[in-house]
Amino acid sequence: MNRRKFIRLAGGGTIAAATAGTLAACGAVGSHYPAEAVEAWNGPVGENDARRRAVAYAITAPNPHNLQPWLVDLREQDVITLRTDPERVLPHTDPLGRQILIGHGAFLELLVMALAQQGVASDVLLWPQGELPTALKDWDNRPVARITLQPGGQPDPLFAQVLQRHTPKTDFDTTRPVAPALLAQLLNSAQAHTPLRVGGTVNADQLPALRTLCGESARVELLTPRTMMESIHLTRVGPAEILQHRDGISINSPFVRAVSALGLFDRSAPPAEGSAAYNNAMGRFEGHSRTAMGFVWITGPNTRTDQIHTGRLYVRQQLQATALGVGMHPMSQAVQEFAEMAPHFERVHQLVLGRRAPRSSEEATVQMFCRMGYPQGEVPATPRRPLARFVRT
Ligand SMILES: Cc1cc2nc3c(=O)[nH]c(=O)nc-3n(C[C@H](O)[C@H](O)[C@H](O)COP(=O)(O)O)c2cc1C
């Protein structure tokens, strides 16, 4: 039997590809990530220091494009100083650094939870040397937070979910609606840091417009060359690249690995609309949008402190979703602050808040916008870099 598969190219042509031999040349066959790349999800191994153990949990925090932009300084006794890694920011899709700082909030929340689990309380001081400036290009080395360890610390029931939490970047099961009572449970469980607010919907009348917004805003990100290239530069295909970087957008599906191994995955230029690569990426976004069975969001003012608090709240909400067995997946395109996205930025504020998009950091901003639903299979853990890469001792 002829076992060849065919890859459809832009323009309608096909080539024979992805034979067993090609796949074998890619390394391991199958979509699982290499075990070493996801070892963080085993929790701290052989770490005795309470701070290092806490950091080992905190690096599993959700964060945009899985850049893992955290640096911790442990040189001062009983103190953890958290800074941003200046190499790990997203100037095109996150020009104000808002999403990167939400990722810092998520890290901080897990850090505090993991310390509390060990009987250590945290005194968190945000911005000990003042807030980071508005423009990413002006960011310097000032700390995001200084955490002073103290005796005490009450274990948090959500800690049990930390190593179980995975973002489902997959289509959801459209035969399983999300019950209004479950949404209510999820929203009620979130203790919002005032003035932040949580909201959401599973209402059939509201879903179509929100799904359309997801699809259309994703299209803008894909068709804007500099934002598309930002993702392409962070894409890791196949076991060797995934192991080398252990960050970014990891793709290990046999099809994409085969395309890449054949030299057909051009990473030097954004894919043209209608090309195989574009259709593949857009197809994923369309699947995610179409199968959104509900939406949840976090809104509020938009100071640097609000961004950190959003991250703390977001990760708690995702841990709660994990406990409830439902998937929560951010679709952030519409809330991104680059010029080409402005119409969708306006629309997401109209749909979620019923008001215009903010013109200042005091006005209500949609900070997180996530689809909800039930994943159709096991959600894989996403890679993390080794602990040592985050720690200055
Ligand atoms: C502020 C923020 C924005 C995010 N936006 C997106 C997004 O637009 N699309 C997406 O697939 N994941 C998004 N994510 C989820 C990350 O991709 C995910 O956390 C990261 O890949 C690590 O995977 P994990 O959460 O399973 O550990 C976002 C996460 C954060 C904190």
Image: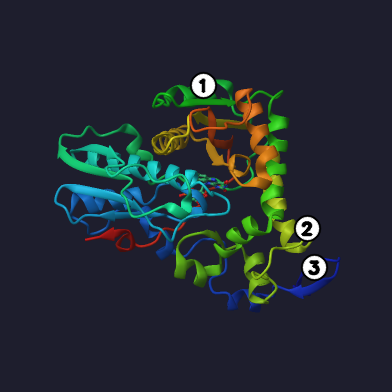
Q: Looking at the image, which is closer to me, 245 or 79?
A: 79
**Which residue position is annotated with label 3?**
9
Measure how far apart labels 3 and 2 are at the Cα level: 12 Å
Q: What amino acid is labelled 3 in the image?
A: Leu
**Of the image marks 2 and 1, the number of the one nearer the N terminus:** 1
**Of the image marks 1 and 3, the number of the one nearer the N terminus:** 3
Measure how far apart labels 2 and 1 are at the Cα level: 40 Å
Task: Tell me where residue 187 appears, x and y as whole percent.
Answer: 48, 24
**Which residue position is annotated with label 2?**
273
Task: Tell me where residue 74 appears, x and y as whole percent.
Answer: 21, 55
**Helix, strand or loop at disc 1?**
helix
**Of the image marks 3 and 2, the number of the one nearer the N terminus:** 3
**Helix, strand or loop at disc 3?**
loop
* Label at residue 84: none
Q: What amino acid is labelled 1 in the image?
A: Ala
**Which residue position is annotated with label 1?**
184
The residue positioned 66% from the left and 23% from the top of the image is: 203
The residue positioned 35% from the left and 35% from the top of the image is: 158
Q: Looking at the image, which is closer to me, 83 or 66?
A: 83
The residue positioned 57% from the left and 54% from the top of the image is: 92
Q: Is residue 373 visible?
A: no
Is the residue marked by circle 2 packed among few (<14), some (14-19), or many (20+) residues within 10 Å? Answer: some
